Image (cartoon, grey):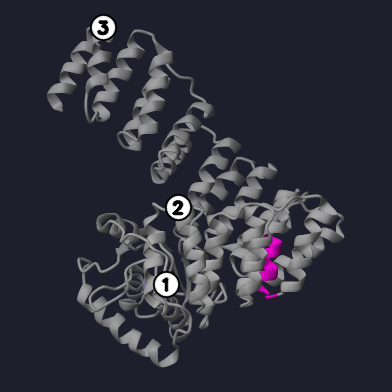
Amino acid sequence: MRVQNSLLAVYAKCGRLSSARSFFDGMEGKDSVSWNSIITGYCRTGEVGEARRLFELMAEEGNGDEDEATDLFQRMEKDGTIKRDTASWNALIAGYLQNGQKNKALGVFRQMQSLGVTPNSVTILSILPACANLVAAKKVREIQCCVLRRNLDSEMSVLNSLIDTYAKAGNVVYSKSIFDRLLTKDIISWNTMMTGFVLHGCSGEALALYDRMRQLGIEPNRGTFVPLISAYGLAKLVNEGERVFSSMTEDYNIIPYLDHCAAMVEIYGRSGRLEEAVQFIEDMAIEPETSIWGALLIACMVHGNIRLAVLAGERLHELEPGNAMIQHLILQTNALGENPEDSVKVKSPDKRNDTKHSLGQSWMERKNVVHSFVAGDHRQPDAEVLYSWIKSTIQDVKRHDSCDGLCIHEEEKEKSGWIHSEKLAFAFALIDSPRAPQSIRIVKNLRMCEDCHRTAKYISKEFECEIYLNDSKSLHHFRDGHCSCGDYW
Ligand SMILES: [Zn+2]
Ligand SMILES: [Zn+2]
């Protein structure tokens, strides 16, 4: 690589840019030095348009670290290749975000401010969604401070996005305080706040908010009905949910979409009215898709209905025959069924593919460091201590509670020596501190299993410690032995 880079630098420096470019294009595994040479080459010959285009491409492909990128960026500003303005920095941030590199985008966001370039509402609106998770709560705070400093708090879209991001980062109380202080609220503010309450299992607050909105004479729109139906589901108010679902079309002329229908399946599911859920799906005016059958499958898992679980599995398999996760779920459902003729026929998924899909991972922040945990991992420092702590805690949990649903897991079942990642995170958080932390925040890539859910409830009571856990399906807030999801996820 070093030889290739020096050759490239020679071409670029002596002005033979077309040779440099074809050499650059043919290079495999370009690093930041290669990008640097070619961009500087274009700057020198005054072809600023091409230099800028390459620069954005570099950010998009996520080459180099953000320090090198911003370094180069600053030199281009000095040369006059690009204007020192917010728009060009926003382009750089957008490049990193497009490539899924949230931390690098945040790094650029910080550098931009330290260099005196003022973020605008576009910057904030692009960076905030990158912090919409439980381990980024501090970053949301940092961005909010920037919003206040730059007087961007008069922009409704920025405040709505803050309400949304705070809720997703586990601080719905902050969302509420921003919402309450809004002098004017648009329909998005109301919908976002309702969605935040539903996410945290606060059905009462969501429904009260809807009432207040109606009292003020504000018309609901399509986006209002998803959190509204979900709130009725959480509160197990099936009739009210049915009424509002039909009033969507009758009173407001809004045709229900898939997300409204999935919320209806969940209403029936949460109340254990599975046959009505199936009837609802059969009567749907639009073609049911994976979200609908997925909602039915969850209902069947929670209420232990194998026959309907097989039906939901069959439909999911028809819609996405290549989905390894669905195959994995169906194989487990089949194994639980009594009648082999009920089983859905699926090939055993490709083993390599399957493990890739079902490898559970959790992330947790402690003292400003994000730690990651992988199911069955013994390479953690003090792994043996963690495992023995978990073993004794599991014994305690078993004495308290048992499972009556269908135990179908998205990830491989736990066995001795193979423990799910969130349990490793619980142990890590609780084991070496003299007092249990007030709260633990975890992000997990797969759906939590019943056993880990039960363990988290137990820990929240025994250690007086709140646990926030975002899995691939929902946000769980465990407090005093209960979970905000109502044991339905
Ligand atoms: Zn588990
Ligand atoms: Zn839960």
Would you say 116 lies left or right of 172 here?
Answer: left
Would you name the residue on which mark 2 appears?
320
The residue located at (86%, 61%) in the rendering is: 215
Is residue 203 depicted above or below 89 in this figure? below
Q: Is label 1 in contact with label 2 (beta carbons under 8 Å)?
A: no
Between 163 and 142, the one nearer to me in the picture = 163
Dot 1 amino acid type? Glu
How packed mark 3 is, by other alpha carbons closer than 10 Å (few <14, some 14-19, many 20 or more), is: some
Q: Read off the residue under disc 1.
A: 341
Disc 2 crowd, CA 10 A, few/some/many (<14, 14-19, 20+): some
Q: Quadrant of residue 330?
A: bottom left
Image coords of residue 447 (percent x, y): 44, 66
Can the viewer see residue 140 in this picture?
A: yes
Which residue is at 33% across, 11% downward? 44
- Give the label on residue 419, or none: none
Relative height, residue 74 to residue 384 (above, below) = above
Tag of residue 15: 3
The amino acid type of the residue labelled 2 equals Glu
Label 3 vs 2, first from the N-terminus: 3
Residue 481 locus on image (x, y percent): 51, 83
The quadrant of the rendering that contains the N terminus is top left
Residue 218 visible in the displayed image: no
**Residue 16 vertical placement versus 217 (above, below):** above
Q: Nearer the viewer, mark 1 or mark 3?
A: 1
* Highlighted magenta segment, given as a residue range: 227-236
Q: Earlier in the sequence, mark 1 or mark 3?
A: 3
Q: Nearer the viewer, mark 1 or mark 2?
A: 1
- Real-space Cα distance between discs 1 and 3? 74 Å
